[in-house]
Image (cartoon, rainbow, N blue to C red):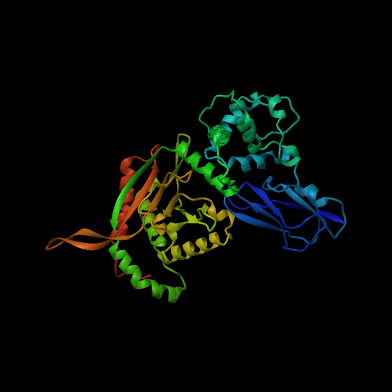
């Protein structure tokens, strides 16, 4: 009998690791081709790993809740054929061979990693010089910034393959330390460690009565919390507001939505209309469609719009409409409906949540008038659209000003004041409102 090594597959750009959520097959179970062996979870979506071969599961390399890197051997199957472990020999890699893959995997987790890697090369020899244990350059860099000696690093228990210390192992260790001997140099990862210390201290200090209910955060809520804290600490948030008269838009949608549903089998909501207006405004003000890498501003070529979507369990996910500037309103509508449906049925792929350059959140769907959303890092702006309400408003006519009942809504733009000033932020959100207000009542799609 031969053995086959089941690897954690590549799951899309910027997806480097996954958490083992549940083993569907247990050692000794027969596995058919395309049978699901294990359920995994990335930063935002859950997925399944099927077997490309038929055989019997004989070994699980990771336990539930452990983190595996893309390319790691997660299970061994016994299959028909000769040879003892040919597949394992070709697919599994030693610590030294895996170093580039691990560096790339861990690097994608931190914006600005290119600068981090360059600094790592300059001083990684200060950490872990005389040791037979393998450490990735990123782990060495974090250890250096936090003043962790090679002896102390050797004492950390690793959860990676063959006991290797991962980035998360080091962060967990730092979170439990009573004090930090290293001086922060503004890199993102040491700040995360500090955040965890603060959260840990707050949890210890909290007191509850016998009637209070203690609810442990699930994995996704913990990730959301970490992401939000990181964003606020990274970017100085500023928010600009505009009120828009969308009466023509509302009347046009009411006129065409039934025919579009009948003809295209697609429900026309307000979200794709808002996204189209955002895309047009980004074309007018491309410096909103950027990210920051240290002192570098990266101007994005593609316009990929993330749309915040509430899940039935109360959590939030942000699937991304790729290359939105190349889509018609009907194309955006199809993408919005498809992503929203798959998000709510837990069928998103990891790549569906990657690569966003700007985010829209429709808080009006919850009856909210306006809000101050938190930027989805590494983006620099996020737009919240409030509920559309009927209000008395002044209408300018050729015969003079009159009071009329109009459909009004607020738009709230949060932006990173490091790179987006009030003039740019204010003009951008005003331009989005202009596109919505000047809607063509005779438009066809």
Establish if 161 lies above or below 445.
Answer: above
Q: What count of labels does the image hold?
A: 0
Q: Residue furthest front?
A: 210
Instruction: Identify whether 254 is placed above or below 156.
Output: below
Can residue 318 be seen at all in this image of the molecule? yes
At horizontal 41% and vertical 55% (from top left) the residue drawn is: 363
Q: For the N terminus, which image quadrant?
A: bottom right
Please give left or right for residue 243 compared with residue 270 in the image. left
Residue at 44% in and 53% down = 303
Q: Where is residue 158 drawn, in percent x and y?
A: 71, 36
Task: Report x, y in % for residue 149.
Answer: 66, 24
Camera-nearest residue between 14 and 250: 250
Measured as percent of width and height from the top left, residue 39 is found at: 68, 55
For the residue pair 63 and 167, the one nearer the viewer reads as: 63
Tell me if 243 is positioned left or right of 53 in this view.
Answer: left
Q: Is residue 354 left or right of residue 249?
A: right
Q: Quadrant of the C terminus?
A: bottom left
Residue 70, given in percent of the width and then of the height, sits at: 67, 48
Above or below residue 424? Residue 116 is above
| Quadrant of residue 171 within the rendered picture | top right
User: Residue, x 58% and y 27% (percent of image)?
Assistant: 145
Residue name at image x 60 percent, y 31 percent: 142
Name the image quarter holding residue 32. bottom right
Q: Is residue 321 visible?
A: no
């Amino acid at each position: 009998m031969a053995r086959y090594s089941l690897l954690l597959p590549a799951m899309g750009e910027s997806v480097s690791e996954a958490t083992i959520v549940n083993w569907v097959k247990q050692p000794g179970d027969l596995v058919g081709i395309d049978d699901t062996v294990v359920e995994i979870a990335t930063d935002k979506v859950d997925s399944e790993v099927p077997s490309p071969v038929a055989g019997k599961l004989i070994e699980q390399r990771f336990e539930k809740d452990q983190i595996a890197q893309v390319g790691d051997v997660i299970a061994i199957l016994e299959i028909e054929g000769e040879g003892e472990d040919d597949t394992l020999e070709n697919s599994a890699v030693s610590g030294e061979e895996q170093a580039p893959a691990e560096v790339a995997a861990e690097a994608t987790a931190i914006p600005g990693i290119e600068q981090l890697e360059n600094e790592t090369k300059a001083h990684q020899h200060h950490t872990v010089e005389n040791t037979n244990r393998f450490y990735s350059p990123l782990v060495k860099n974090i250890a250096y910034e936090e003043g962790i000696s090679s002896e102390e690093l050797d004492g950390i228990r690793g959860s990676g393959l063959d006991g290797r210390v991962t980035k998360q192992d080091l962060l967990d260790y730092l979170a439990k330390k009573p004090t930090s001997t290293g001086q922060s140099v503004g890199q993102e990862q040491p700040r995360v460690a500090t955040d965890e210390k603060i959260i840990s201290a707050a949890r210890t200090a909290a007191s509850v009565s016998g009637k209070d209910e203690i609810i442990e955060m699930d994995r996704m809520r913990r990730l959301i919390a970490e992401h939000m804290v990181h964003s606020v600490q990274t970017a100085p948030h500023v928010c600009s507001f505009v009120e828009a008269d969308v009466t023509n838009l509302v009347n046009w949608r009411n006129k065409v939505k039934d025919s579009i549903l009948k003809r295209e089998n697609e429900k026309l909501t307000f979200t794709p209309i808002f996204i189209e207006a955002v895309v047009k405004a980004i074309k007018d003000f491309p410096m909103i469609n950027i990210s920051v890498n240290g002192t570098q501003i990266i101007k994005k070529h593609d316009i990929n719009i993330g749309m915040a979507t509430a899940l039935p369990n109360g959590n939030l996910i942000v699937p991304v409409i790729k290359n939105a500037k190349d889509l018609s309103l009907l194309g955006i509508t199809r993408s919005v409906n498809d992503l929203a449906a798959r998000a709510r049925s837990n069928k998103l792929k990891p790549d569906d949540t990657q690569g966003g350059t700007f985010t829209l959140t429709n808080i009006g769907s919850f009856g909210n008038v306006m809000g101050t959303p938190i930027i989805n890092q590494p983006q620099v702006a996020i737009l919240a659209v409030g509920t559309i309400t009927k209000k008395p408003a002044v209408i300018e006519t050729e015969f003079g000003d009159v009071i009329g009942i109009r459909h009004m809504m607020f738009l709230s733009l949060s932006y990173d004041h490091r790179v987006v000033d009030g003039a740019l932020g204010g003009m951008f959100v005003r331009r989005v409102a202009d596109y919505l207000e000047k809607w063509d009542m005779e438009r066809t799609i």
